[in-house]
């Protein structure tokens, strides 16, 4: 019966999107996509009951990494490298799902979701589907790795998978979070001279979106983001100079008036440690993200120059 279901599912999904175009790797480690983390070190201290580590791959290229909690059908964070961007969004990319979260799939191909509500039931077991948002009128799909932080069309398209999406209050997304993401985009465009390592995540509220009287999606309590740019413009204006090499922000996913609070990395980590789903050893970046000038001074001291 299991083989039959897998066969039917594969027949159902095959015509929807070219199998070689979009793929991911799901495993218990980020070994294949560790380069999306600063010093190849994922964040520590984030808990979950059914955690899966996804190396998101699109058009035969790894794009970013996601820690996914199947029990809440929710990504806990996505880690990516910021690309200088004009802030434009993709409007023509279909929403996708991850077949490896429901069964072993050697090809690892992500597939486009059906445009109808007739989603194969196996897909729904461990991840969100479009139907979960149909009656959740207060919420919109928010990207943890946002397309406006990517430059190339394929990088932007790869963000449109529901394993990179959390339900956000529409007013909060439009008036607080999206403007904050654009502020970060402009800041890193102007003052980050090298790679900027990004981690965007959530804390859990304990409340879920229901569909057909069944709990479906975990609703984030807070949304947060942090960046690490070791090589930055040391002649930047005073009002942004203290925001490098690292800085962060967080906000309550609420109805009205909840703006993003920008804070130093250690303050953000301290705030996250106060949440029930975060351990006391929580660390977003290895050694708190160290400026490249620190390493240059260290090398000079060792050489005696």
Image (cartoon, rainbow, N blue to C red):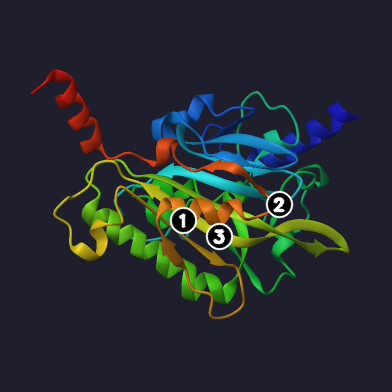
Whether residue 86 appears in this view of the structure is no
Whether residue 181 can be seen here: yes
For the residues labelled 2 and 1, the Cα–Cα distance comes to 32 Å
Q: Residues within 10 Å of mark 2 (few under 14, many from 20)?
A: many
Q: Residue furthest top?
A: 303
Instruction: Tell which tag, 3 or 1, sits nearer the viewer.
Output: 1
Q: CA distance from mark 3 to mark 1?
A: 15 Å
Q: Are marks 2 and 3 in contact (CB under 8 Å)?
A: no
Between discs 3 and 1, the one toward the N terminus: 3
Q: Mark 1 highlights which residue?
A: 267
Give the vertical position of 17 relative to 118 (above or below): above
Side (left or right) of 241 relative to 217: left
Determine the secondary structure under disc 2. Answer: loop
Tell me where residue 113 appears, x and y as whole percent: 66, 50
Q: Which residue is mark 3?
A: 223
User: Could you say which is closer to the camera, residue 91 or residue 284?
Assistant: 284
Residue 277 horizontal/vertical position (percent): 68, 49
Label 1 Cα neighbours within 10 Å, binned few <14 / some 14-19 / many ≥20: some
Q: How many marks?
A: 3
The local crowd at label 3, few if under 14, some if 14 to 19, many if 20 or more residues have their Cα within 10 Å, is many
Instruction: Name the residue located 75 percent from the left edge and 36 percent from the top edge.
Output: 102
What numbered label is drawn on residue 82? none
Residue located at (29% from left, 51% from top)? 244
């Amino acid at each position: 019966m299991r083989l039959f279901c897998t066969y039917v599912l594969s027949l159902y999904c095959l015509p929807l999107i070219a199998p070689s175009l979009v793929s991911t790797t799901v495993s218990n480690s980020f070994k294949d996509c560790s380069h999306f983390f600063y010093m190849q070190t994922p964040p520590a201290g984030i808990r979950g009951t059914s955690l899966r580590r996804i190396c998101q791959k699109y058009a035969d290229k790894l794009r970013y990494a996601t820690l996914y909690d199947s029990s809440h059908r929710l990504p806990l964070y996505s880690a990516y490298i910021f690309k200088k961007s004009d802030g434009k969004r993709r409007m023509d990319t279909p929403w996708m799902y991850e077949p490896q979260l429901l069964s072993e799939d050697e090809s690892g191909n992500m597939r486009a979701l059906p445009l109808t509500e007739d989603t194969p039931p196996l897909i729904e077991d461990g991840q969100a589907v479009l139907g979960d948002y149909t009656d959740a009128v207060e919420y919109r799909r928010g990207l943890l790795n946002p397309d406006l932080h990517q430059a190339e069309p394929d990088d932007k398209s790869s963000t449109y998978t529901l394993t990179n999406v959390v339900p956000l209050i529409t007013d909060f997304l439009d008036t607080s979070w999206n403007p904050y993401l654009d502020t970060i985009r402009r800041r890193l465009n102007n003052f980050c001279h090298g790679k900027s390592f990004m981690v965007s995540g959530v804390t859990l509220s304990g409340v879920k979106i229901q569909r057909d009287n069944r709990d479906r999606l975990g609703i984030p309590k807070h949304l947060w983001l942090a960046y690490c740019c070791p090589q930055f413009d040391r002649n930047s204006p005073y009002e942004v100079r203290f925001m490098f090499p690292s800085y962060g922000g967080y906000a309550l996913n609420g109805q009205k008036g909840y703006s993003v609070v920008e804070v130093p990395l250690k303050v953000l980590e301290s705030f996250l440690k106060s949440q029930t789903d975060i351990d006391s050893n929580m660390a977003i970046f290895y050694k708190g993200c160290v400026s490249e000038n620190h390493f240059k001074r260290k090398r000079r001291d060792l050489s005696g120059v």
